[in-house]
Each structure stands twice: as C-alpha cells, then as structure tokens.
Image: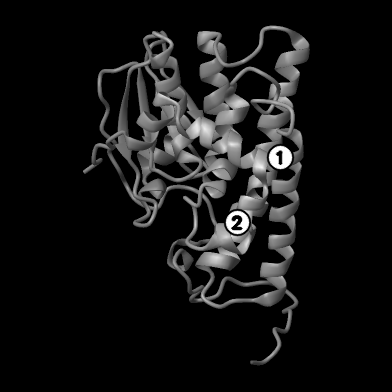
Amino acid sequence: MSQYQLPTKWEAPKEMGGQWGSLNQPTAGSRFEQKLPKGKKPFQVYSTGTPNGIKATIMLEELKELGLQADYDLFKINIGEGDQFGSDFVAINPNSKIPAMLDQSEENDIRVFESASILLYLAEKYDRLIPKDTLGKTEVLNWLFWQTGAAPFLGGGFGHFFHYAPEKIEYAINRFAMEAKRQLDLLDKELKDKDYIVGNDYTIADIAIWSWYGRLALDKVWDNASTFLDVTSYKHLQKWAKNIADRPAVKRGLEVEYKAIK
C-alpha cells in the first residue's frame, strides 16, 4: 500500500468508499425537493433509531410517563438513503442531522435541531428532568455539553474506523479506542458513588449520555465493540446503564414505531 501524499489543496475524491461514503459531500444545503408529512400532535419528530435519534423519543416518553401532555408524531428519516438532505428537512435542520423537531403547540412553529438542544428545550418547556437551582442546573449542563463534545470521538472517531471504514487503519483505531476507553473510565469513576451522573436524580444529562455510552456498555451500538473495549470491566457504568435500560419510558422510546415519510 502506497503512503498517502498530502496535496497542496484538498479536493473531494470521486469515491470515498465505506457504508456512508456515497452520501458525503463537502457542501451543505438541500439536494432535492421534499415534502415532509405533518401530523396534528404538538410535536413533530423526524428521526431514526441512532444513539442521537433515540434521545428525542426517550425524552418525550419520559415526559409522558410523568403524566404530561407531550404527544408527538414520529417520522422516519432514512439517513442511509439521504432523506436528511431533502428541502423540508434542511428547513428544520440546516445541518442535515437527525433528530429534528417542530413544536406546533406555540403561536408560531418552533424548529429545534441537535439532540442536546431538543433535550434542553423540552426540559425547560415542561420544567422537568432538569434542576431548578443554579448549581444543579449548571452541573446537568456541564454533562450535557460534555456528551455533545465527547461523543464525536466515540462515534465519528472510534465507531467509524472500527466499524464503518472500508479498511482497518491501526493508527486510527488505536487513537480513538484510547479516547473511548478514557471516556468510559471517566464515566465509571463519576458513577462510583452516584445513582445518576449528577447525583441522585435522573436528568436529561443521563438521557444524553446513556444513548451513547450506556448503549455501548450494553453492547447495543456496534458489533463486537463492547468486547473490543472491554466495557464489562466498568462496573459502575454497567450498573447505571442497566438501571436506565429498565425504565419503562426508555423501553418505549426504543420501541416506538416510525411513520414513513413517503
């Protein structure tokens, strides 16, 4: 194999290879005209069952579990077929990532995109799953934003080179496995004497982190990744992950049916 030579100026290759290579482009924006369906329920959610996508459905089911009116229509965005690049979806999320949501319960529809933003929006709208005091709320936000910053190293880094890349690159896998293990160790240490990531109360920070790291701990993300990373050695993380997996709202959030968009 010849060594890659850096060009003076990068140009997009004709073929990237790998599971997602054909979808990648160096430009943003819509690629085709699209008409997304809308239901009559307060929230219109456009998503699919990825670690980021399940955050929205788990949050809405947790609110319903608390007896709140948080009904939603859920539509499947097939990211493997490029639904996220259609004009209607891009109008909700110009970054073309799931999940995306419309709140139809206000005077004007409100678009909410990025999974952490959806969690925070719903927590503040309903005044649930987030502390009221400044100290507690700030700690939840610390961990919520930790997850948004850390997970790309886990998903786009480790997960990509371990599972999706068309070839196994030792340096890349070692680089991101090292960081994934560091993150898992961090969470394991934090959860040693706590039921949840910020203490005794379950919050949106737990939903955000569990959707990636809890599911990884339970071997639900990439085939053989849990064995490769030896996730069973993180005993406190394992306990936390299993406790959250047993929550009725979490189970419903994972099992909910998606409606087709076309």
Other-residue count near label 2 (Cα within 10 Å), few / some / many at <14 / 14–19 / ≥20: few
Percent position (x, y) of residue 259? 24, 37
What residue is rendered at 43% in x and 30% in y? Answer: 250
Q: Which quadrant holds residue 192?
A: top right
Looking at the figure, which quarter contains the N terminus? Answer: bottom right
Q: Which residue is mark 1?
A: 187
> Residue 240, relative to residue 213: is it above or below?
above
Give the residue type that dot 2 points to. Answer: Gly
Precedes in sequence: disc 1 or disc 2: 2
What residue is rendered at 70% in x and 61% in y? Answer: 176
Question: What distance separates the C-alpha of mark 1 from that of mark 2?
Answer: 19 Å
Q: Which quadrant holds residue 80?
A: bottom left
Percent position (x, y) of residue 260? 23, 41
Looking at the figure, which quarter contains the C terminus? Answer: top left
Q: Which residue is mark 2?
A: 156
Comparing 87 with 237, the one in front is 237
Q: Residue furthest left?
A: 262
Comparing 111 with 76, the one in front is 76
Query: Residue 74 vs residue 25: left or right?
Result: left
Percent position (x, y) of residue 6? 74, 79
What residue is rendered at 37% in x and 35% in y? Answer: 46
Query: Residue 171 vs residue 208: left or right?
Result: right
What residue is rendered at 76% in x and 51% in y? Answer: 182
Circle 1 — which element?
Answer: helix
Evaluate whether residue 34 shows in this view.
yes
Circle 2 — which element?
Answer: helix
Which of discs 1 and 2 lies nearer the camera? The answer is: 1
Percent position (x, y) of residue 216? 55, 49
Evaluate whether residue 99 shows in this view.
no
Give the residue type that dot 1 points to. Answer: Leu
> Residue 190, relative to residue 17: is it above or below?
above
